[in-house]
Amino acid sequence: MFIQPCFIRKNTKELKDRLEKLGYKICKCCELEDAIWLNNYTPTSSIHGTGYSNEEIGISAKESLNLFLEENSNYIDCGTNEDLFLAIAALRDDTDKNQYFKHNSKNHFYKCDMDSFKDYFDDCNKELNDHIEDYHKATVDELKELLNNKKIYCSKCGGTNILKEAWVDANTLIYVNDTYSDRYYCEDCMEEVNVIIK
């Protein structure tokens, strides 16, 4: 079952499609023209639209949004950050799929694409010296830190033209996952560099 209520200040078809892939049901209220926010109602695993006017009770769209904020202080505000919204909306207690796991002492994250993080870890990460016990399910604060649109800058030139070591499929050259080393290469300086995240 989904466990963390949250909302996003946007409403697009692509976003609703991604939420359906997570296992949510999309309520008809999301299709109303002035439903400009989406929120997840965790007890029913459903997505609802917010911000539409209700002429029957004489409430405007703006008043509807304000009312939602007053009545739902336990919801996490994701602004317009889709990655953050989807990561928090994916949090659940009956599967590990689509959830992030963080190393206990390093800034390494995995996004699990299997029902069990143990199976995912065993299957995808045979080369690492880490152990499954070194990881925990990322908290909301850790997800905010990871997905809050911070940029990585070269510590020498200040540029953002940075490459990070990663694994790619040798046949298709499609990204698979990070190697979780802390090696970065600045294409402007043309050398391996330290980085600053801000």
Image: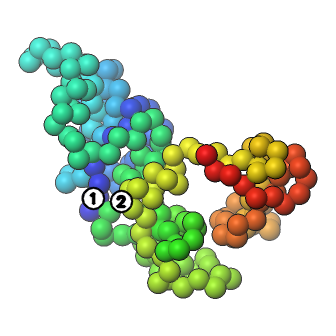
User: Are circles 1 and 2 on residues that touch, CB within 8 Å?
Assistant: yes
Of residues 18 and 104, the one nearer the viewer is 104
Q: Mark 1, residues whose alpha carbon is within 10 Å: few (<14), some, or many (≥20)?
A: some
Amino acid on which disc 2 is placed = Leu
Q: Secondary structure at mark 1?
A: loop
Residue at the spot x=19%, y=54% of the render? Answer: 43
Rendering coords of residue 142 (x, y %)? 45, 59
Residue in the foreground of this view, choosing between 189 and 143:
189
Q: Secondary structure at mark 2?
A: loop
Q: What x and y, as percent, mark residue 101?
A: 48, 68
Identity of the amino acid at label 1?
A: Ile
95, above or below 132, in the image: above
Q: Residue at x 56, y 44 (%)?
A: 149
State the residue position of label 2.
91
Q: Is residue 22 visible?
A: no
**Residue 123: quadrant of the picture:** bottom right
